[in-house]
Image (tube, rainbow, N blue to C red):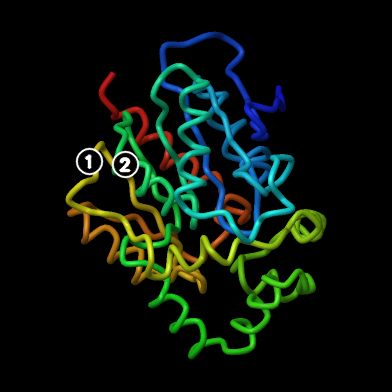
Amino acid sequence: MLKTQIVEGLEVFSCLPTKKTKLPPLLFIHGAFAGGWMWTETFMPFLAEAGYPCHALSLRGHGGSDGSEHIDWHSINDYVADVVTVANWLGEAPVLIGHSMGGFIVQKYLEHHDVPGAALVCSVPPQGLIASQFHLMFQKPQLFMDINRIMSGNYPDTEVLREALFAGEIDETMLAAWLDRMQPESHRALWDMSMFNLPNLPAMHRPPMLILGAELDVLVPAFLVQATAQTYGLPVHIFRNMGHAVTHEKEWPLVAATLQTWLKGLRP
């Protein structure tokens, strides 16, 4: 059963297993323009059923968290501080699972904190957003402009969202609901991810890490996910025929099952 609560101004969704286990808690971190809601219908119930206590926060200015009126001033460091707040509230170091911008936040969190494991899902690479921005601008210039419109609160229609986030057949009701919950993202945070606050690789803790990407992702292309894996000296799993929003593609259980298999291999 899904529970929602406010922790120091942050919206936190929790989905717990029916029986208490000794498995580590999972903390899910959403990407840009989204909120903790993106995990609640798929990955969280799937992994809670496998025995993992699952939690997802909405970063400040997102979803039901405080700070939406100042969204443009929030930095990546602010978002990292939000993860620290919720991790401290959990009372136990969680396994971090970050999607897109959330994966970048996970990497920044590891500069000062250790965790049992960290999964980067279609994550912004440690080298930042510049390469993906140029790739999108040259490969899909109209989509590049449409996404930039979101920054000023001008939301695209469902067809633009479909092209940006999905590759396979998707449920139209889900697509409309996703569009309805989208929101502007902080310009400051996006600049941080572009060049001004990239991960300090020598300073990072290196827990067990999982690197996942999607073959048809137009926002964080597979070659950049592969570059992330090469940076950390790790293998990478690229899911065929999927787009950026692997949490809601029709074949999302394949991604969740891969995550579950990796979690089983973490040291107690």
In this view, the residue in front, 125 or 82, is: 82
Disc 1 is placed on an element classified as loop
Quadrant of res 236: bottom left
**SS type, badge 2:** loop
* Residue highlighted by disc 1: 206
- Please provide percent x and percent y for residue 122: 45, 58
Callout 1: few (<14), some (14-19), or many (20+) C-alpha neighbours within 10 Å?
some
Left or right of 171 on screen, residue 61: left
Q: Are marks 1 and 2 in contact (CB under 8 Å)?
A: yes
Tell me the CA gap for discs 1 and 2: 8 Å
Disc 1 marks a residue whose amino acid type is Arg
Mark 1 or 2 closer to N-term? Answer: 2
Splitting the image into 4 quarters, where does residue 244 fall?
bottom right
Per the rendering, the mark at residue 110 is 2
Expressed as whole percent of the image width and height from the top left, the position of residue 72 reads 63, 61
Horizontal relation, residue 264 to residue 42: left or right = left
- Residue type for callout 2: Leu
16 or 153, which is in the foreground? 153
The C terminus lies in quadrant: top left
Residue drawn 37% across the image and 60% down it? 197
Quadrant location of the N terminus? top right
Q: Position of residue 84 (x, y in %)?
A: 46, 33
